[in-house]
């Protein structure tokens, strides 16, 4: 059975070019970059090249790029690293984030609350966008970190991260040298493949992303840390990654993520246009089905994510019936796919419970085709009709 893949917000296919260069560093150029011999120095040069490619794409210095195992680790390193750097300071600290963050951010802040610190969770509107005035009002003298994701993983809403960065920058300038620091951290995992990501435009202090969302392998991530930012490492060992993240470097995956960034840097605008056309096709045809709701507004969303709800048709049932036809979609974030309760992201956006249960997430990539989209439209139309006919009549 042919596999048609529409779950690219969960993970992406490794690009053939990325795979080929990665294999070289698994079989031939397998040296440890901490070694001084030639094989080791070849590995060092490969790591340095990837770091430079990524820094050029982000618009930062190579020394501001730290390699990690994934974006979850990057988010943990940024947030816990800031909190741990403040050990010894008197009083509790205040953090600000959103009500729609990825679990790798949300769960950290829930833990920080339990430790006695204060966390403000910003609300979002029905498009999944934060209110900048609410952010301004939330900042206090003891606020040390603002975490706002760039693009939401479940509905694709694009947050006003540049405006957030500007607000935090103004607060920084108003603080005295002996005051607490305040930093801006953004999870850019879902933005990297489809939107321009420049750290100076965003004015962020930390930015995280992962390889497996940009057609590189799983198990590799990046954390941008602005020069001068104070952070305490979470693990101890050698001096790799400027002493911030010790451990033997995953050279094959580092080379792979660098290659993936190089590829997307060349063709990002073209892929954005193609994916936007496919998303518009899906919306145009799927909204012909009765009792359907697109969650969020396309003007405020990344083109690769479409979250859509069908009343009186369970999202889990739609997913399973599509899977039987060889079509992969999601009912939301893969990191919370084991949960049966209504999506917290959709609830935060004010989507009624009866609509959240009928939601699926369709996520596209540069490998998605018009023919695949037409097959998906046909299958969903038939499945929703079948499920509604099977549903018990409510009197």
Image (spheres, rainbow, N blue to C red):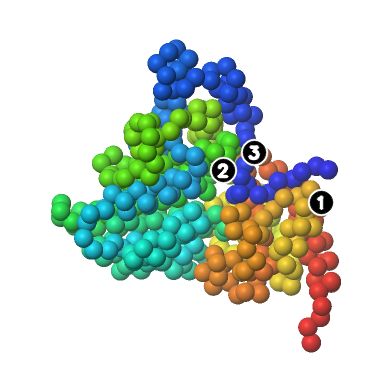
Q: Residues within 10 Å of mark 2 (few under 14, many from 20)?
A: many
Residue at 71% x, 43% y: name it.
Answer: 369
Work out which residue is located at the far top of the displayed protein and give it. Answer: 38
- Name the residue tied to disc 3: 13
Name the residue nearer the viewer: 117 or 278. Answer: 117
Quadrant position of residue 48: top left
Asked whether the viewer can see residue 108, the reply is: yes
Residue at 46% x, 65% y: name it.
Answer: 99
Whole-number angstrom distance, CA of label 1 to CA of label 3: 20 Å
Whole-number angstrom distance, CA of label 2 to CA of label 1: 24 Å
Q: Do tag 2 and tag 1 residues touch (Cβ < 8 Å)? A: no
**Residue 56: percent from left, percent from top:** 40, 32
- Name the residue tied to disc 1: 325
Q: Quadrant of the C terminus?
A: bottom right
Q: Do tag 2 and tag 3 residues touch (Cβ < 8 Å)? A: no
Name the residue nearer the viewer: 293 or 55. Answer: 55
- Name the residue tied to disc 2: 213
Quadrant position of residue 147: bottom left
Quadrant position of residue 21: top right
Whole-number angstrom distance, CA of label 2 to CA of label 3: 9 Å
Q: Do tag 1 and tag 3 residues touch (Cβ < 8 Å)? A: no
């Amino acid at each position: 059975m042919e596999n048609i893949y529409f779950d690219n917000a969960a993970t992406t296919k490794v690009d053939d070019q990325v795979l080929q260069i990665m294999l070289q560093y698994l079989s031939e150029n397998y040296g440890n970059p901490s070694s001084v011999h030639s094989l080791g120095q070849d590995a060092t040069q490969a790591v340095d090249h990837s770091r430079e490619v990524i820094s050029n794409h982000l618009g930062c210095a190579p020394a501001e790029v730290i390699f990690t195992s994934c974006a979850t680790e990057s988010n943990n390193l940024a947030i816990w690293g800031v909190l741990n750097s403040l050990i010894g300071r008197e009083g509790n600290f205040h953090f600000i984030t959103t009500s729609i963050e990825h679990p790798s951010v949300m769960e950290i802040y829930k833990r920080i609350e339990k430790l006695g610190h204060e966390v403000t969770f910003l609300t979002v509107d029905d498009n999944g966008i934060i209110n900048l005035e609410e952010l301004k009002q939330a900042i206090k003298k003891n606020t040390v970190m603002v975490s706002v994701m760039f693009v939401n993983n479940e509905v694709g809403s694009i947050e006003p991260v540049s405006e957030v960065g500007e607000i935090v920058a103004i607060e920084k300038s108003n603080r005295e040298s002996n005051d607490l620091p305040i930093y801006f951290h953004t999870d850019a995992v879902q933005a990297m493949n489809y939107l321009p990501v420049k750290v100076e435009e965003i004015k962020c202090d930390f930015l995280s992303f992962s390889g497996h969302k940009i057609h590189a392998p799983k198990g590799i991530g990046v954390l941008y840390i602005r020069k001068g930012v104070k952070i305490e490492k979470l693990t101890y060992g050698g001096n790799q990654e400027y002493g911030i993240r010790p451990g033997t470097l995953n050279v094959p995956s580092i080379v792979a993520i660098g290659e993936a960034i190089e590829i997307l840097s060349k063709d990002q605008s073209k892929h954005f246009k193609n994916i936007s056309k496919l998303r518009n096709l899906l919306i145009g045809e799927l909204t012909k089905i009765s009792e359907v709701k697109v969650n969020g507004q396309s003007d405020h969303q990344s083109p690769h994510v479409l979250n859509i709800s069908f009343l009186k048709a369970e999202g889990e049932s739609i997913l399973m019936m599509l899977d039987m036809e060889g079509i992969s979609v999601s009912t939301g974030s893969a990191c919370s796919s084991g949960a049966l309760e209504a999506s917290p992201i959709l609830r935060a956006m004010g989507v009624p419970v009866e609509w959240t249960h009928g939601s699926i997430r369709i996520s596209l990539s540069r490998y998605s085709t018009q023919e695949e989209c037409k097959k998906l439209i046909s299958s969903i139309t038939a499945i929703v009709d079948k499920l509604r006919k099977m549903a018990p009549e409510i009197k």
